[in-house]
Amino acid sequence: MLRGHMPDGASNSPLSRMGAILTGPRPGFVSVLGLAVAGLVLLWLFVNAVQTPELFANVALIGLTNGAVFGLVALGYTLVYGILQLINFAHGDVFALSGLVGFTVLFSVFKVSADAASVMTVLAVLAALAITVPLFATINATIEFVAYRPLRHSPRLAALITAVGVSFIVQNIGLYFYDVRFRSASQLLPRDPVFELGDISYSWNKLIVLLITVPALIALTWFVRNTRQGKAMRAVAQDRDAAAMMGIDVNRTISVTFALAGSLAAIGGMLFLTQFNLRYDTGFELGLIAFTAAVLGGIGNLQGAVLGAMLIGFIQAFNEGLTWLSPGSDWTRSIVFGILIAILVFRPEGLLGERTPEGA
Amino acid sequence: MSSHGQAAEGRSNGVVLRLDDVHTYYGAIHALKGISLEVREGEVVTLIGANGAGKSTTLRSINGLNTPRRGRITFEGRDITNAPAHEVVKLGISQAPEGRRLFPRMSVYENLEMGAFQRSDRHALKEDVDRVFGLFPRLAERKDQKAGTMSGGEQQMCAIGRALMARPRLLMLDEPSMGLAPIFVERIFEIVKEINEQGTTILLVEQNALMALDAANRGYVLETGQIALADEASALRENEQVRKAYLGET
Ligand SMILES: Nc1ncnc2c1ncn2[C@@H]1O[C@H](COP(=O)(O)OP(=O)(O)O)[C@@H](O)[C@H]1O
Ligand SMILES: [Mg+2]
């Protein structure tokens, strides 16, 4: 939906060009190979589901929850790529920093005591979001203003390298203020089961993640589809100069896009903090995972980012949770980044992306 | 043509747009080397010249996509030299740019809607869409089609329609006939006259000098970033130099 397009007619994304260089014309056997792999994976899932159905269901629910968090971060990559054709490598680090700042807000500002989860602690998490979301919206828009806007008319590689630089800067800010220790707020959300079906259970702390993520995703989609600002974003993504000629303030629109991405990252950072632990460099790997999700879905495509993130969430959970012939957590990285490479080589436009981004 | 000229004289002959010694650069490339021109209310003024002469750059200087380094541009008496593009359209100048530049993944209808993006009287949108559909019935048939999937001629109609949606007082058209089949070219020039007769002042950039001079009241000939000739359209059509260089005569 926000898939970018370059007005000069060189409308192949760098990703698809990367893929084209590696493969040349798309060979037919690739689809066969792809189907074979998919078939084997489905068979593996099926056998696991039959052998240990409760475990399978529990693991799937974990995958769903984690996928939702990945989705929040993946959307930030895809929003920014859609409008600037920039892979914002700093995004994962902004996410991690937002989690660390969220920790400060919860425990130093609100002075939440962490011994037992209660309605109050859940409300504290929501209240902390009311602080970190606008804060990181501003921070992300500022990053664009300071680091990327001056390079708007430079070769795209310049902005890409700058993004890597910003990634290090944000990471080191996290290191400076939070040292190397991991932080977590996993005690704040209640772990009582929402439902139990035999051995299958789903706990409140996971449901709360969905209760926050799903409305955020729906709100974002609605925003981009229906609001004036959303239309401006789509127009700028499709043709920046033409958008300006329509009376759209391009700079403002790009700022809003970064603010939205920063907001989603802040929600993701907070939820991550309530599920796992994180520190200054957590954003590096999680950012790459979320980026993989965005590419898997079709970078620039909002629904694609969510779909890709869900798939990665399931892949990770099944790989680490299932028992029969699972490679296990040592292999999660290899599998996820193997998928990234495979997508870039064989289907750079992703699952939902269009094969040829049309010229005007 | 003469009725055209009279229509222009009938209105107040106020200058709507004035360029005064405008210099515009692309980095170190000096693309416009002191352009001065004016467009009066109710006129069709054409800017002709070879590829690379600076016609599009002149429009980009007016509409705010390229800010001139020297010189002055005024529209209805207001200095717009440094106005950003999104402000210029609010002041009453809109454009169908070279290469059409539609939003390819939006429908024809959405493209027209985008044309009215900056207007505050958006309730009048329907009326204006109907006006555009009246000028280009083909667009009505295709209103739900993705703009990027239409033919060149249809896209050009959509681009002109989109520019009209801004209710401009000055409409700028950059090579509207480029790459179109002859029947589309004639239709486009008819439409240009029709729009002008409905009261919109037009600045028309063309390489098709013959058609452009037929449609225009006055014309400017651009050569390598400078105005080489400026005259009534009828006089330019008779001019030796123009006939040789742009009308394909030897
Ligand atoms: N984006 C650009 N970057 C650098 N030079 C440009 C650019 N666009 C146009 N030019 C140069 O400016 C001059 C005028 O171009 P242009 O205004 O597009 O001419 P025209 O519309 O008359 O064909 C040409 O020499 C062209 O090469
Ligand atoms: Mg041109």
Image (spheres, coloured by chain):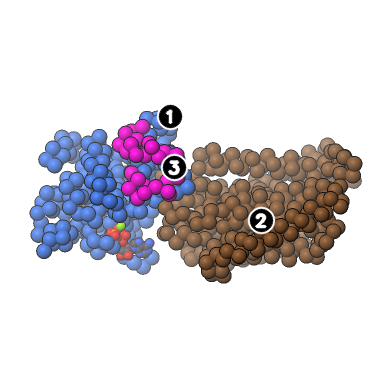
Chain colours: A brown, B blue
For label 2, the SS is helix
Tell which subunit mark 1 falls on.
Answer: B
Tell which subunit mark 2 falls on.
Answer: A
Q: CA distance from mark 3 to mark 1?
A: 23 Å
Taking the image as shown, residue B120 lies to the left or right of residue A47, namely left
Which one is in front, A299 or A126?
A299
Which one is in front, B54 or B37?
B54
Q: Which residue is mark 1?
A: B123
Where are the magenta residues, as a range?
B130-157
The quadrant in which residue B209 appears is bottom left
For label 1, the SS is helix
Q: In the rendering, at what x and y percent does residue B203 appear? A: 26, 47
Picture residue at 36% right of the left edge, 68% below the top: B28
* Amino acid of disc 3: Gln
The quadrant in which residue B15 appears is top left
Q: Quadrant of ligand 2?
A: bottom left
Q: Is residue B95 above or below residue A357?
A: above
Taking the image as shown, residue A205 lies to the left or right of residue B232, namely right
Tell which subunit mark 3 falls on.
Answer: B
Q: CA distance from mark 3 to mark 2?
A: 30 Å
- Nearer the camera: disc 1 or disc 2: 2
- Nearer the camera: disc 3 or disc 1: 3
* Amino acid of disc 1: His
Q: Is residue B138 magenta?
A: yes
Q: Which residue is mark 2?
A: A293
Q: CA distance from mark 1 to mark 2?
A: 41 Å
> Are the residues flagged by discs 3 and 1 in contact, CB closer than 8 Å?
no
